[in-house]
Amino acid sequence: MTHLGTHLSALVDGELSGTDLDRANAHLATCEKCRGEAAALRELKTQLRVLVADIGDDALTSRLLAMPDEDSHPSGPPRPRPAFRAYSYQEAPDRPPRAGREARRPPRSPRHRYFVWSAVSLAVVGGLGAAAFGMGGGNPGPGPDVIPPAEVFNVEHAITTGDVPLPETSRVPKTKTPGTAYPSDTARRAAQRQP
Amino acid sequence: MMSVLRRPVLFLSAAATIAVPGALAVLAVLGHGHAARSAVEQAASAASTSGVGQADMLPAAAGGPAGAGAASTAQPASGQLAPEVRGGAPAAALAAAMNQVRGAQLLTAAATAGTSASYRGVEVIANTTVGGTVTVMATVWHRGGGRTVTQTSDTTALAASQPYIVSYDGDNRAPEGVFGVTRTLVRLLATHYVAVYRGVGTVVGRPALIVEANRADGSVAARFWLDERTMLPLRKDVYDTADHLVSHDEFIQVRFGALSAPTAAASPAKVAGGAQPTWTAASSPATLLKQLNGQGCLLPGTLPGDLNLYAAAQATTASGRVVDLGFSDGLSAVSLFVQRGTLPGQLPGWQPARLAGHTVYVAQHEITLSARGFVYTLVADAPAATVDGVVGSLPPDSRPGVLGRISRGLVRLATLADPFK
């Protein structure tokens, strides 16, 4: 046995017309369960209207309740639901109405989603910052006393750069004349005397 | 789409996310193109407007201070003085472009000659370092593609000379060039400077081809004299941005061909090289640097002075594991050795000094300091201003603030999460 399912709300909202309306009414005439559900939906609608009237002074709530659905049209007749054209009542799946937590959950507004995403982003950034702060703490231990092996480093540097390693005897500079790097005449002559 | 437009904050965030990186990318592309265009335009402009000016400048710088001019002479490239070149801007631009192409080719050939040529010569090397000027003399013997032996003496102590001999085994590791002209450094030089052929000259009586490395503003950063026959570098002068000569390397004797190696046993020489640990070169220097940073070093990938990380190696020495990071712009070269530990209170042979906010110890072109559980030792062939900047970029020996700690933590997290390490 198949029932009106999700098309029941369209019937109650007065969105059905023509053949679809005739078929739905015919089904209601023979199905007590759907009749009961339709009556319950109509009762719910009535109560909601009363509720809106009672809290009419609250401008924000009124505006929120008056916000149209994304699918609704601001004017003109209600749009027929296209799904009715796709299959007949006999072929329609027997989908029970939503129940439990999902049915009770109110629809999410864009502002609500915005706040949720902001909170999630802040949590991620804050968590990452906290983790980085924790990871960045603590210097490595002082370690052993190290005397740099200057000779080893000199030779490695010379190999890498294609230069000549400086001798250990000249580790302390002998002259301090910034701005000129020319060897003195004495040094040049002494060098030229070498074999 | 309409629902996004109804939320201005979300819309602005999305727009900024797309627009900011896009604008940065456009700026980067335009800036690169502008820099490249500027360098070429300046080179062309210099060639077209100062054909004589270049000739005037060249001998003055090439001759240098009194006493040095006799060893080397220079004449400008003939193409720059030709009347037809001075007459037309297009011809001058063409000549400048050709000189640039030839300059780059000559330096590449010089880097190859440094390893393939067999020679024996005497070099004089004078470097202005942080602590002053160091002048040394070295006898270098090299067999093409093989072994190299250098015998170095301090020129201020030649009378009581105790030569310092370093023998490199060609099967292990050997210097990859002469006067810093290696294939790797020539490639780096091409990215930071414009190499220009400048004519012919002589060094130790041998005809030489002169190549200049010019900065983007057209100033001369270095000048090379290459042996015309073998392409071996015979002389190299390096200038700082104030046009001071900061480094001078020159052969004062040289002979080419298969020559016998010097005999180390004949003199009471200090022989090094045998004590060298086995260095393992890193296939990816950036990865090794990232690992070091993950351990708390926080070293940058590029040091001040536009010195790029181009090589890295590690070895185990008597004082523990050492990582060698090589930085260079093609002319200036800094080797940064990093090891765990601290410096002792006394360092014999090193002079304490204050440099760029750090307490350091200096010995000729070496500077060492310790910070946050690491000892950093620089061996620098670079102008003093560059060395100052490099030392200033090293981590300070103090506790980091909140931002510094978060920054270090992010680096460590990135290192942990890096799938390519």
Image (cartoon, rainbow, N blue to C red):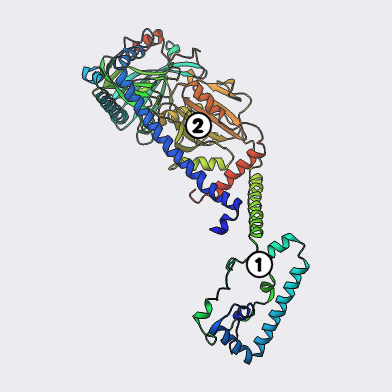
Say left or right for B381 vs A148: left
Residue B366 appears at what percent x and percent y? 51, 24
Crowd rating for badge 1 (residues with CA inside 10 Å; few <14, some 14–19, many 20+) = few
Which residue lies at the image location 66% right of the left edge and 90% below the top edge? A32
What percent of the width, then of the height, locates residue B280?
44, 40
Q: Is residue B335 above or below residue A13?
A: above
Mark carried by residue B303: 2
Report in which chain the residue with disc 2 lies. B
Q: Residue at x 52, y 21 (%)?
A: B363
Residue marked by disc 1: A107
Work out which residue is located at the far bottom of the displayed protein and give it. Answer: A30
Secondary-structure class at tag 2:
strand
Percent across and percent down for residue B318 are 53, 34
**B345 with respect to B364 (left or right):** right
Tell me the kind of residue under disc 1.
Pro
The answer to whether the residues at label 1 and label 2 have Cβ atoms under 8 Å apart is: no
Q: Is residue B359 above or below residue A1?
A: above
Q: Position of residue B348 (x, y in %)?
A: 57, 21
